[in-house]
Image (cartoon, rainbow, N blue to C red):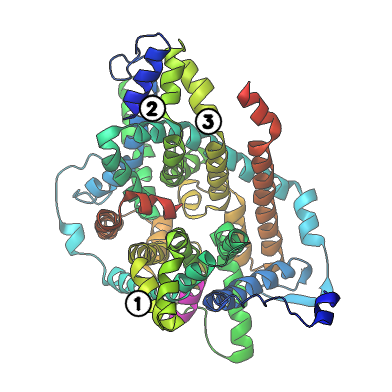
Amino acid sequence: MSSTRDTGIRAPRKPRNPFRVYLVPLFILQFATFLVPLVLFFRTAFFKNEGPGLVDYGHATLEYLGLIFVDPYFQQVVLDTIIFGLLVTVFTLLLGFPIAYCIARAGRFKESLLVIVIVTSFTSVIIKVLGWKILLGASGPINSILQVLGLVDEPLRLVNNLFGAVVGTVHAVLPLIVLLLVPVVERVPVQLEEAAAGLGARRLTTYWRVVLPASRIGLVSGGLVAFAYAMGSFTTPALLGGKTTLILPILIRQEAMTTVNYPMSAALSITLVVIVAIVTVIGLSVGNSRRARVRESK
Amino acid sequence: MSDLDTRTLMSVNGRAPRARRSTKLSFSDIAIRVVAGIGIVFLLLPTVISIIVSFGPGQFPVFPPQGWTLKWFTSIDPGYGDAALTSVILAAWTAAISITVGVPASFGLARWGRGANVLQTLARAPMQVPYVVIGVMMLQFFVLITKTTGVPFVGTMQGLVIAHCVVAVPYVIGAVYPTACLLNTSLDDAAYGLGASRLYTFFRVVLPSLKGSIVAGTVFAFLVSFDDVPITLFLVGSNVQTLPVKLFADTEFSFTPELFAVSTLATVVTCVLVLILTKRVGTQRMSGASS
C-alpha cells in the first residue's frame, strides 16, 4: 500500500459501481417504512405497558418476554402455534409432492395443470374460506356423504376448530409449494428412474430411494416455506379456526386491537419471528448436512 | 432424444429396454396419481363450491343449492362497490409505486456483482415477517408519525399505500430480478459506449428487455395489495374500507348469500387477470415469482 504511494504509481482506481444509484429508492423505502417501524415496534416489548395504547418508555422491563416463557397460557399458545405449523407442513408436503411429481411428468397436460395451480394460488383467501365453511359445515356435503355411507351417526365437527384451520391453511399454501416443487422434480432426470427400473428396482423403491432423495433440498425448502406461511397466517385460521384455535398471529392481533397492549403484542411478535428463524436455520442445516448427503450417496 | 439415449445405454448394458413408463403402471404409480388427482380436486373444490352456492336462492347459503337465481348479484349492497373501488385504487397505487422502486432496484441488484445475493435477500426481508406483525408495527408507527407531524396515516389511503408497498416491492423484485440477471451486459455497455446516457440506456435498452417480468411484477403487486387482510385490518378507518377487509369482517359475524356473490365477482375478475397474464408471460415466469 505504502510502497505504491512511494513509487508514485497508483493502481487503477476501481470505478465506482454506477448501479448503486438504482438501489437508492429501495433502501430509502425499506429503511423508512420497514426497518424503522420494525425496530420501534420490537423495542416496545422491553418497556412497561401504561394502559390501552400507552407505553412508558422510561420504564424498561423484561416482564412481557418473560411471561411468554413462564405463563402457562402463553406457553400453550406458543406450543399450539408450533403444532399447527407442523401439521400444515406435513400435510402440505404429503399432498404437494405427488401433485408436483405428476405435473412435472405430465407431458402435454403439464401446462394446463400448472395454470390451474397458478390460478388457485392467486384466488382470494376469502372465497376459499367461504367454500370451506360450506364444505365442512354440520349440514355440508362432507358430513352428508359420511352420514349416507353410515360412517358417522351425527355430523362431525369439522370447522371452527383446529381441523378446519389446518385444512384451510394447507389449502392456502399448497399451490405455492406445488409451484416450488415442480422445478425440483423436473431437475431429477427421467433417465435416473429408468436406470433404477432397468436395474430391477420396483416403482415404490424408485420413488423412495431415487426420486425423494434427489428432491431432498427442494422438499426441505418447501417445508420451510409452508411452515413459515402457516406460523404467520392469520385470515384463514381466524375464520375457520373458531375461538378455540388461538395461535400467535391471532393473539398478536387481539393484544394490539382489543386490549391495546403494544408491549405484549410486540413480545409475541418477537417470539413468532424468532421461532420461524430458528426452525429455518435448523431446517437448512439438516437439509444440507453432510450426514444426510452421505446417507444419500450410500 | 432422451428416450433414445436411454435405449442405447441399456442395449449397451446388454438388457432390453424394459419398463417403458407408459406400458405398465405399478401400484405405487397409480397411488401417486390418485393422490395428485385428489390434490387437484382439493385445490379447486372450495372455490367452485362458493361460486355455485352464490347462485342459490335460499336465505342461508347451502350446497347443493335448491334452485338458481341471480338475485344476490343484483342486490349487492353499495357498500361493497365503494370498498371494491377503494381496493382497486389502493392496489393501483401500490403497483405503480412498487414497480417504480422495484424495477430499478432489481436491475441494480443484477449488476451489483459480488454480494448481490445477500443484498437480494435483504431487499426481500419484509417477506420473512408475518403480515400481522407488519400490520401492528405500521399502526404503531403511523400513530407516532401523526402525533409528531399531524399528518394522518391511519384510516387514510396514503397510509394503506405505504404499508402495502412494504410487502409488494419484494414481489416485484422476485419477478424482475431473475430476468434482470439474464440481461446481456454488453447490450447496455454498447448503448453506453455509443454515447447514450445511463438514464437513456436504462429506459430504452434495459426496460424494454424486462417488459414481460415488469408486467408480471405489476400484477403480483396489484394482487398482493388487492387481496390483503392482515395488514389492512389494522389501518382501515371509517372512511377507508377495502373489499377483503369488509368481506373478512362480514364473514366473521354473518354468513349471507351476498358474501358469496361478492366474492364470486371478485374471484372471476382475479382469475381472468391471472389467466390473461399467464397466457402472455408463460407459466414458468408466473410460478417462479409467486413463491
- Give the number of the disc on residue A51: none
Q: Mark 1 points at which residue?
A: B204
Q: Mark 3 points at which residue?
A: A214
Instruction: Please tell me whether mark 1 or mark 3 is closer to you in this view.
Output: 1
Q: Do labels 2 and 1 share a chain?
A: yes
Chain of the residue under the numbered disc 2 shown in the image:
B
Q: Which amino acid does label 2 sit on?
A: Val
**Is residue B39 among the parts visible in the rendering?**
yes
Q: Which amino acid does label 1 sit on?
A: Arg
Range shown magenta: B156-163
Instruction: Please tell me whether mark 2 or mark 1 is closer to you in this view.
Output: 1
- Decide whether the magenta segment is chiefly helix, strand or loop: helix
Q: Are marks 1 and 3 on the same chain?
A: no
Q: What residue type is labelled 3?
A: Ala
Residue at 57% in and 91% down:
B150
Residue at 66% in and 55% down:
A273
Mark 3 → mark 2, Cα distance in angstroms: 20 Å
Q: Is residue B179 above or below residue A155?
A: below
Mark 1 → mark 3, Cα distance in angstroms: 43 Å
Chain of the residue under the numbered disc 3 shown in the image:
A
Label 3 element class: helix
Contact (Cβ within 8 Å) of mark 1 with mark 3: no
Q: Which of A3 and A294 is in front in this view?
A: A3
Q: Where is residue A197 in the image (x, y as percent from the top left)?
A: 42, 15
Callout count: 3
Chain of the residue under the numbered disc 1 shown in the image:
B
Magenta segment includes B162? yes
Q: Is residue A24 above or below residue A95?
A: below
Q: Position of residue B13 (x, y in %)?
A: 43, 12
Residue at 49% in and 43% down:
A165
